[in-house]
Amino acid sequence: MSAAASGLLELIGNTPLVRLNKVSKLTGCDIYGKAEFMNPGGSVKDRTALGIVRQAMRAGLLKSGGHVVEGTAGNTGIGLALVGNALGLHTMIVMPETQSQEKRDALRLFNADLKLVPAVPFADDNHYTKVAKRLAIEFQQHGNAIWANQFDNTANRDVHYQTTGQEIWDQTQGKIDAFCCAVGTGGTLAGVGSALRNHNPDVKVFLSDPMGASLYHFYTYGELQAKGSSVMEGIGQSRVTANLQGFVPDGAFQIPDEEAMAYVFDLLQEEGLALGGSSGINVAGAVHVAKKLGPGHTIVTILCDGAARYQSKLFNPDYLRDKGLPVPDWMY
Ligand code: PMP
């Protein structure tokens, strides 16, 4: 038995790595998922939240009693709210109203001040990130407040470099050929990818992009361009964020929702892993990587969050039918 944690913050990170048996057998590779859904806030974004808040506190921009304001698809907000509660900070979250009810409920549970806004393109002045920035500037007039700015605050990438990437290197004992994941902010891809390449420049890093995002086209053809759409929450980026700047993956795959959901359902039914949609995009990407590299390789991806956060959507036959996605037999 290991010693007791000193408090909630020590429970963030150090997540297990789990072998994904069916896709490993299918491809002849060893495919592992980093079980980020096991973080206390239920997602990979607890790490980002802690990294950003710690950096701001170290820099003297924030102290107990202060306000953290952020625009988020939900998981970063949940992470900031629980980190904030543990450190005596107030959290104000701006979220597009298209995100799941379950995420709203979790934010309210943690007593975050939640502001829902219509989902509009990034160029619009009322994009959720811009609303959050404006609110943060208002708070900052009284001091002791930050805009977390997860997309362009490189404390996000840094925490993945220092923790997630290092953990994956240690857990595979350096026997890793490739890493693959989707991008929301790019903190995970660039942070983990850089950490692994720093240990071994031969590790290949791939982007697994949902439809409707622009980065697949950017890294493949050099131009930001989107095609199609996706129901997946928390991923899909239309620009090169500061977290991605200076980092170039070895390749990219574009994954339709239907392909990703087949992995989500298989992992749930056959391995007991109840995961959210972005994990399906990631595992689908890892299978593409395995096929590209051939049998005998070790590939790691991220299991970002859990199914419960999307029960009313991705695990609801009416929603799936409405979105034109296949409904598995066992769900009727
Ligand atoms: N999956 C989910 C469910 C997320 O909430 C996020 C973060 N928005 C990601 C994946 C992508 O992670 P990152 O922001 O590090 O690119």
Image (cartoon, helix red, strand yellow):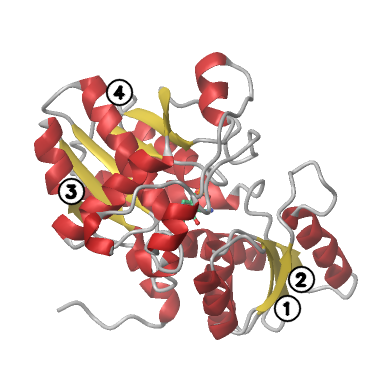
Q: Are marks 3 and 2 in contact (CB under 8 Å)?
A: no
From this viewpoint, is residue 190 visible? yes
Q: Position of residue 303 (x, y in %)?
A: 33, 53
Q: Amino acid at mark 4?
A: Asp
Q: Is mark 4 within 8 Å of ligand 1?
A: no
Is 266 in front, or is 216?
266
| Up-down relation of residue 147 to residue 6 (above or below) | above
User: What residue sits right under mark 4 in the picture?
Assistant: 202
Is 62 in front, or is 125?
125
Residue at 20% x, 41% y: name it: 31
Which one is earlier in the sequence, the residue at label 1 or at label 3? 3
Is 122 in front, or is 134?
122
For label 4, the crowd category at 10 Å Cα-Cα, with few meaning under 14, some 14 to 19 and many 20 or more, is: few
Q: Give the side of residue 118 with respect to residue 126, left or right.
A: left
Q: What is the C-alpha distance between the residues marked 4 and 1?
A: 44 Å
User: What residue sits right under mark 1 in the picture?
Assistant: 66
| Mark nearer the viewer, 4 or 3 | 3
Q: Amino acid at mark 1?
A: Gly
| Mark nearer the viewer, 1 or 3 | 3
Q: Position of residue 103 (x, y in %)?
A: 53, 70
Q: What is the C-alpha distance between the residues marked 2 and 1?
A: 5 Å
User: What residue sits right under mark 2 in the picture?
Assistant: 145
Residue at 73% x, 78% y: name it: 66
| Up-down relation of residue 16 to residue 199 (above or below) | below
Q: Amino acid at mark 2?
A: Ala
Q: Quadrant of the C terminus?
A: bottom left
